[in-house]
Amino acid sequence: MSLLDINTILIGIKIASTGENFSIDHTCPECNSDNSYEIDLSSLIDHYKSKKYENRLVINDLVLTTRPLNYKQSTDIGLTNFQLQQKLKHISEITDELSRSKELSIAFAELSDLQIQIYTFVIESIKTASTSVVEKDFIAEWLRNTDATTINAIKEHVQRNQDSWGPPKKTVSCNECSAENTITLDMDQSVFFAQP
């Protein structure tokens, strides 16, 4: 099941268990006052029903067919990314310049490998005028050897879909100073289901 479908299911479970309203706490960046806002979860289901995943990306003479990450892939990638971020944090504390440089090179190579892994999961096929490639090993090899412009096009395609499928932003006014702020529902299960 795709991660995109999971969000709709999670919202449905939350509505069934606690009702349609969900409270979000937010600290106003203008006056530092704490505010609480209600989100209508049923409107989020309507939001997700209206979305369509754009699964086709054309780059010059190539046509890439993509799909969203599934839940397991997203969780595994999130865990690996967290571990790499922790590694980078520890590297920044290394005082020896040569050791820090060596460890940074290793960490950046691991981040690059993670990006290739994400795009390999996302790309179902690559078509040219004469052939279609669906084998993941070949797709990964192509990604490792392609140019930065192509990688950036893939990155932008993935990001556009991710932004489109994210929870909608809501503009709210601070109860204390009336400043307008933007809030978004955090779909992380540890946050989303922690609140009654």
Image (cartoon, helix red, strand yellow):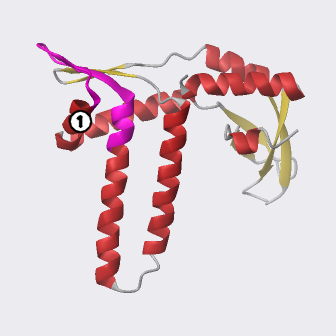
Find residue 43 and report its horizontal and vertical position in percent: 74, 20
| Front one among 59 and 145 | 145
Q: Is residue 144 left or right of residue 188?
A: left
Q: Position of residue 20 (x, y in %)?
A: 85, 24
Which region of the structure is painted magenta?
A: 116-136
SS at badge 1: helix
In reply to whether residue 135 is colored magenta, the answer given is yes
The residue lying at 72 percent from left, 57 percent from top is 29
Residue 162 drawn in magenta:
no
Residue 44 placement: quadrant: top right
Q: Quadrant of the C terminus?
A: top right
As displayed, is residue 27 above or below residue 101?
above
In-front residue for pair 157/14: 14
Residue tagged by mark 1?
150
- Residue at 35% over, 35% down: 119
Relative to 18, is 43 above or below? Answer: above
Q: Residue at x 32, y 49 (%)?
A: 113
Location of residue 53 in the rendering, given as x and y in whole percent from the top left corner: 48, 19
How many numbered discs, if any? 1
Q: Residue at x 85, y 49 (%)?
A: 35
Q: Residue furthest left?
A: 130
Quadrant of the image occupied by residue 154: top left
Vertical placement of 184 versus 95: above or below? above
Query: Residue 58: x, y in percent?
Result: 26, 21
Along the line of sight, the residue nearer the viewer: 112 or 160: 112
The quarter of the displayed image where residue 71 is located: top right
Could you tell me which quadrant the N terminus lies in? top right
Count neighbours of disc 1 (C-alpha within 10 A) and say few if under 14, some if 14 to 19, many if 20 or more: few
Left or right position of 167 against 120: right
Could you tell me the amino acid type at mark 1? Answer: Thr
